[in-house]
Image (spheres, grey):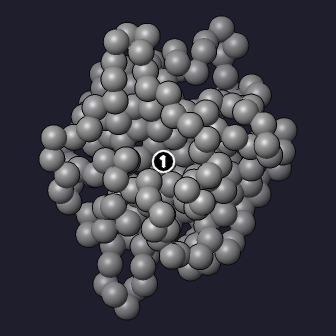
Amino acid sequence: MKNIFNVLIFFLFFSESGCQLQKPEKENEKTVSIDSVFTDNPSGILLSKSYTNDKDGYSINYPPNWNFYEYENAGGIDFFGHFKTPAENDDMSDFGIAIYNKNESKTLDEFYEDYIAEAKASGLLSDISVKRNMAFIYQGKYNTLSFLFTSKSVGTFDTRIHMFIEKGDKIYHLRGLLSPKHPKESMQLYLEIMTTIKFSK
């Protein structure tokens, strides 16, 4: 299968706790399975702009009609723009990256579990689903592992796709807010954006 996802070499379902990949029972405008967008049909949206962060050692591509806002203190960035075009009266897209310094005593597994536990305890996230441990290839080398999962925000219909990537002494949290009008298409776009990330450190 020759498409933009050929950088995602393979997926390993979690087995340490006996947990297997669980697909939602129903797929509708509020629930989209990550599996359903791994197809040969890309979004068709050009990712012609590139953002580079020399301090944190990464670059990533994004659509030409999007803007971004940097959070210097938090070491992150938010990209935003219309999913399609303003003329189509569609809703806005929101894709962000947060950077965490890695605690050397924690594995990425443990970081992920702690993040989810804290988010649930604080009432920020619920319905964590489609957890995957994936091998992520960069410049021809299997040099990092990442988690790909979705979540819902408590008290809202907001659904986000998340990816944690461990690289060196940092953990990169990539996340995108799915479009209520175009959930599957927006997830496809966010996955395409995620595959463009490159690390310089």
User: Which residue lies at the image location 65% right of the left edge and 8% below the top edge?
Assistant: 105
Among the 4 quarters of the image, the one containing residue 38: bottom left
Q: Secondary structure at mark 1?
A: strand
Is 135 positioned to the left or the right of 28 in the image? right
The residue singled out by tag 1 in the image is 175
**128 in relation to 95, above or below:** above
Q: Nearer the viewer, residue 194 or 70?
A: 194
The residue at the point 66 percent across, 63 percent down is 61
Looking at the rendered structure, the number of numbered marks drawn on it comes to: 1
Q: Is residue 99 visible?
A: no
In this view, the residue in front, 117 or 69, is 117
Q: Position of residue 41 (x, y in %)?
A: 45, 68
How far from the left and from the top, in percent, is residue 20? 33, 23
Q: Amino acid at mark 1?
A: Arg
- The quadrant in which the N terminus is found is bottom right
- Residue at image position (35%, 36%) is 130
Among all residues in the image, which is located at the extreme front?
A: 1
From the viewer's side, name the closer residue of 191 and 91. Answer: 191
